[in-house]
Image: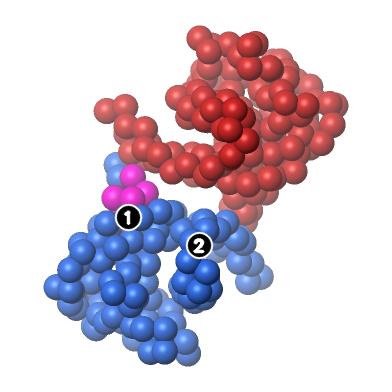
Chain colours: A red, B blue
Amino acid sequence: MIVGALCIRDGKILMAKRNIHPRKGLWTLPAGFMENAETLKVGALRETMEETMSEAKVIMPYTMFSLPHINQVHLFYLADLLDENFGPTSESMEVKLFSEDEILWDELAFPTVERTLKLYLEDVKTGNFIFRDEDINLW
Amino acid sequence: MIVGALCIRDGKILMAKRNIHPRKGLWTLPAGFMENAETLKVGALRETMEETMSEAKVIMPYTMFSLPHINQVHLFYLADLLDENFGPTSESMEVKLFSEDEILWDELAFPTVERTLKLYLEDVKTGNFIFRDEDINLW
């Protein structure tokens, strides 16, 4: 179970450039393996802190993906980034807020990150944020 | 990751009396551990077949629970039961459709089953079925 967060601040999206394998050097939403004794929300916010040094507040569960080819489930929360005191950590070489025009679509680390960003940008247009449960099967 | 289904047929809820430990002899919604190489939906419908011998069609993800005290996440889909050819299996000593008045509240196997049933019966009244993400912490 991978938990992460799409953190928003003034309409911009918080992303981290991975400093760890796999996909080192590519951009991701903060996310990682859920740990023992934590809830989904606590895990998502812990990963956000570990990868971006920032605090966020969960708004809602936003995207959930089954990835049967790698035996994983990915869950991303939509969250408010609480301040702009973010920065790199041992896990991230760079942390940045991206507007829609700035997103580096060719340098994204994972398909579930790309899909979550696309859904978010669609939902921003309508103002209606919907929880999605999708399968991504790369077999 | 535990996946299961709240299967509905003519307004009644499909439940199974467990023939396996833990909670043998208590009533549950069909559910169990997600297996490798399956999606959440496939896992929920497989468990439904294994525990009730019946086929169902997923309507929507319905309840998701973090249970940090046992390092589990439970996800239940709302589903349509496709026919009434259900019956006991090696995992279930009895399978039955319950109307609201018939639910055996004192003989339910798991807190997430009880909570899912309560939320469903609330939503039936309004006709508005909402995905829920809740924590159940029994520490």
Q: Which residue is mark 2?
A: B128
| Residue at position x 65%, y 11% in the image | A102
B46, above or below A11, in the image? below
Mainly helix, strand or loop, the magenta region? helix
Q: Chain of mark 2?
A: B
B71 left or right of B23? right
**Is B40 colored magenta in this rendering?**
yes
Dot 1: few (<14), some (14–19), or many (≥20) neighbours within 10 Å?
some
The number of numbered badges drawn on the structure is: 2
- Give the amino acid at mark 2: Asn
**Is A11 colored magenta in this rendering?**
no
Q: Is residue B97 in view? A: yes
Task: Pinpoint residue A9: horizontal percent, then vertical percent.
Answer: 76, 29
A4, above or below B106, in the image? above
Marks 1 and 2: same chain? yes
Task: Specify which label sits upstream in the sequence, 1 or 2.
Answer: 1
Q: Which residue is mark 1?
A: B58
Task: Pinpoint residue B28: horizontal percent, then vertical percent.
Answer: 38, 76
Task: Pinpoint residue B81: horizontal percent, then vertical percent.
Answer: 25, 66
Q: Which range of residues does the magenta coloring cover?
A: B39-44
Q: Quadrant of the C terminus of chain A?
A: top left
B10, above or below A53, in the image? below
A4, above or below B68, in the image? above
Give A133 or A71, whichever is nearer the viewer. A133
